[in-house]
Image: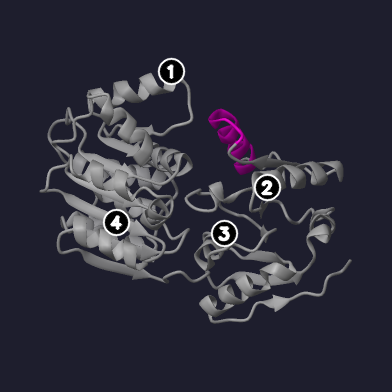
Amino acid sequence: MKFKDFGFQSAIMDGIEAMGFTQPTPVQEQAIPLVMNGDDVIACAQTGTGKTAAFILPIMDKLSSLPTRLNYTSTLVMVPTRELAMQIDQQLEGFGYFAPVSSVAVYGGNDSITWDQQKLAIENGSDFIIATPGRLIQHIRMGYVQFDRIEHLVLDEADRMLDMGFYDDIMDIVKLLPTKRQTLMFSATMPSNIRKLSKSILHKPKEVSIAISKPVENVLQAAYEVNDSKKIPLLSHLLKGKEHVQSAIVFASTKVKVKDIERSLAKNGMKVMGIHSDLDQKMREDVLRKFKNRHFQILVATDIISRGIDIEDIDLIVNYDVPHDPEDYVHRIGRTARAQSDGVALTFINAKEKRMFEQIERFLNAKVFRIPNPL
């Protein structure tokens, strides 16, 4: 199947072609016709399968077919993190280059100028508002948010939003929306709390399920059993001088560890930068932009970017610490092997983490190969 088979408006097709897309992913192939038909949809697909375009494109197509521009916000997209809000906003800008569609990303952690820009876009009725629930609630409390004409509500990375404690904020926002609307829920996992949420806000939804919570097949997974004191030396050994590894992400459990790893690798002459909650928004954006543009080789991060960030062609993922949740493991290693490329995911396991990693293996229904420690 090709994108042209959906019958999109010419302006949308021009944007798709300009972005270099020709063939839809499975979740796009299944979800787009349902969205175009006006159905509520609950879609479950792992990270990196193209969920964003599955709702952006059909909604943009509908807006492009209207005889005149709307002067109100018709689509609200709620997301768990500012990074995902920015990513979706960027994709809207790309796909909508030839279409008369406007968007604004609404998220916290920025200055008063950005707040004023968000406020102005909300008041003027941007076609798409892509928002984190907490920041959107702040704007709503100021009294100028009008959502009485919302036609499409999208919850992206819904499982992550609930994990982060946004359930009450989501429900408070939903109460402000028209009951007659199209609601789309996209999630990487489908736990019971997602099912409960879907029953309360979706109407007779159609379901799409693609490769639920399993790593893509072309990720080579392996693990090292190593004491904490030996983790940084092992990491340095694995990365130093590896020119064929053009792009690697190291995930650590705390920002203190991120800083220690970044400092140690830099002392060993490696091109490395860290990203964590102590960095302000502009600094985090700058780090991610430089990493995407291959200005440095190794990104060290907390889980702040393990979901929702669209960075392709990652050669290597290292779990410096074992994730507490098997789902987080899947999302972390989902950063590699994107777009049909191959990838490697390595995990460091200390004595206390063995039981947690065994839980991950049971979840995967597979044994991850242990590599002997070379040090």
Q: Which is nearer the eye, 355 or 107?
A: 355
Considering the numbered disc 4 on the image, is that residue within a helix, a strand or a loop?
Answer: strand
Q: Residue furthest right?
A: 375
Residue at 56% over, 52% down: 312
Q: Looking at the image, is mark 2 or mark 3 earlier in the sequence? A: 2
Are the residues at dot 4 and dot 2 in contact (C-beta closer than 8 Å)?
Answer: no
User: Any magenta on residue 92?
Assistant: no
What separation in Å lies between label 4 and label 1 (alpha carbons)?
Answer: 32 Å
Identify the magenta region. 278-292
Q: Which mark is residue 149?
A: none
What separation in Å lies between label 3 and label 1 (alpha carbons)?
Answer: 34 Å
Q: Residue furthest left?
A: 180
Q: Looking at the image, is mark 3 or mark 1 earlier in the sequence? A: 1
Q: Looking at the image, is mark 1 or mark 2 earlier in the sequence? A: 1
Please provide percent x and percent y for residue 173: 24, 41
Q: Which mark is residue 185?
A: 4
Are the residues at dot 2 and dot 3 in contact (C-beta closer than 8 Å)?
Answer: no
Which residue, given by chain and number where applicable, does mark 3 sit on?
332
| Amino acid of disc 1 | Ile
The quarter holding residue 204 reads bottom left
Left or right: residue 182 compared with residue 266: left
What separation in Å lies between label 4 and label 2 (alpha carbons)?
Answer: 30 Å
**Residue 1 seen in the figure:** no
The quarter holding residue 361 reads bottom right
Number of residues whose C-alpha sits closer than 10 Å to that of mark 2, classed few (under 14), some (14–19) or many (20 or more): many
Seen in the picture, residue 331 relative to 267 is either above or below; the reply is: below
Which residue, given by chain and number where applicable, does mark 2 sit on?
300
Are the residues at dot 3 and dot 4 in contact (C-beta closer than 8 Å)?
Answer: no
Q: Which mark is residue 113?
A: 1
